[in-house]
Amino acid sequence: MLSEHSDRGAMSRHGKAGAGVVVLIVLICLGVVGGSTWMAKRSQMLAEEQVNLAREQAARAAAEAETTARESLKLADQLQPPAEAIPSTLDQAKAPAPVPGAIDAAAIRFGSKARARRADAVRLATYNVANLFDDKDDPALKDRYEDMSTVKPVPELEGVAAAIHAIDADVLVLEELESADVLKWFRDTYLSDMGYTEAISIDAGDPRGIEQGVLSRFPLTEPTAWPRMPLAGKHPAGGDEAEGAPIVFHRSPFKVDVIVPAGARGNASDYDFTIFAVHSKSGRNSAYWREAEAMGIAKLVQTAMGDDPGRNVVVLGDFNASQTDASFQTYLSSGLIDLFADRRPDDATLTTHESGRAIDHILVNAAMMPEVIRDSRFIFGTPARPSGVDYRTYPAPKGYASDHYPVVVDLRPVEGGAPAPTPQNQGGKPVDPAAK
């Protein structure tokens, strides 16, 4: 009896102990599971914190990169307040009747007023004058390229002349000229008081007959063009030429050297620079063509700089591309500097085309950048048609000149940008470095 009772007690004790062990194991497992859940949540929180931190760091890095880029051009801390915009109207039909005069000021939607040129500066400008054809027939242009259908009306010629007088550029690059003869005729007829002793234009290979030209108060030398020069690649399906055809310059760039003689602007010695006048292929389906042209022009610029590493180079004209387009970025990747890099897309004072886009640009190489007077930049506003109208049927406003506007900048014609010595500035050392 005692032995049986003892066995039962032992079994009871062993059973309780086993149950306790089971309970302990369960509790441990629950603890482990709970701990694991907590650890998982904690890991998720840490991961989210890391993501947020990475986003903040990326945002800071982007902001710092933008600031650094602007500072590298020395533009941000040199800018003056924007030039006063001319009052505009988006709906010409509702605009008040213009005051009698040569220009309908209410139709000026983009650009700003002209800024005075400093006596010690050379003013440089580019201006697409929109089909500057005369009324003489060119027998080489026929059918859809017939030049007599694009004769520029006298009021528009007068509008172009008024804009050129207003900006008062020393060296003026023009796009969409019919020929050198037309350029000289226009100069002698409308700009005889401007002092443009030099007028050069070269055939660009364009089937419509338009080319770039230069008017200058200073000597021009070594004019060169590369009409129909082969470029990289072939035309794709859906392009503006037959699929598989080799890509060539639609309009060749025009290169010319400018010599600012000693003393012309207070400079002690001659100041030289090289112009590449650009008029890139237009058209929505021709982005690939503009990219090929940009690569070709960049190589020509690099070749010119290779022959003379210290050469001052400016590339300007109608790029038919905005700053974010791949073709324009090609120029920046080659080392050229956009003088309007801080341009905002919504800034009407820096818009260069009637469509509201900025497609006309001035770029310089690093050697020329110190001579740029950064606070001199402006786009000169001229009358434009209202937004959304058909330019083929809507009448041009009074004073209309072109669908593009002049883009202007001043240069100090001294290597390195140092001003000429004065009694207040002995030895040519700048009195106020921020003035440039």
Image (cartoon, rainbow, N blue to C red):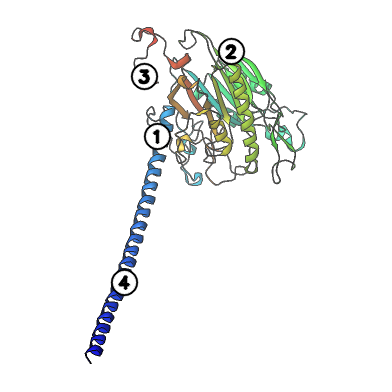
CA–CA distance in space, label 4 to label 2: 98 Å
CA–CA distance in space, label 1 to label 4: 62 Å
Query: Mark 1 sits on what residue?
Result: 67
Nearer-the-camera pick, 285 or 139: 285
Residue 44 in the image: state x and y as whole percent: 37, 58
Q: In this view, does 312 lie above or below 382?
A: above
Asked whether disc 4 touches disc 3, contact meaning CB atoms under 8 Å apart, the reply is: no
Asked whether disc 4 touches disc 2, contact meaning CB atoms under 8 Å apart, the reply is: no
Given the image, on which type of amino acid does mark 4 rest? Ile
Element at label 4 = helix
Query: Mark 3 sits on what residue?
Result: 433
Q: Quadrant of residue 183?
A: top right
Query: Mark 2 sits on what residue?
Result: 219
Question: The N terminus appears in which quarter of the rendering?
Answer: bottom left
Which of discs 1 and 4 lies nearer the camera? The answer is 4
Given the image, on which type of amino acid does mark 1 rest? Thr
Given the image, on which type of amino acid does mark 2 rest? Pro
CA–CA distance in space, label 4 to label 3: 80 Å
Which of discs 2 and 3 lies nearer the camera? The answer is 3
CA–CA distance in space, label 2 to label 3: 30 Å
Q: Residue 25, which numbered label?
A: 4
At label 1, counting other C-alpha atoms closer than 10 Å, the crowd grade (few under 14, some 14-19, many 20 or more) is few
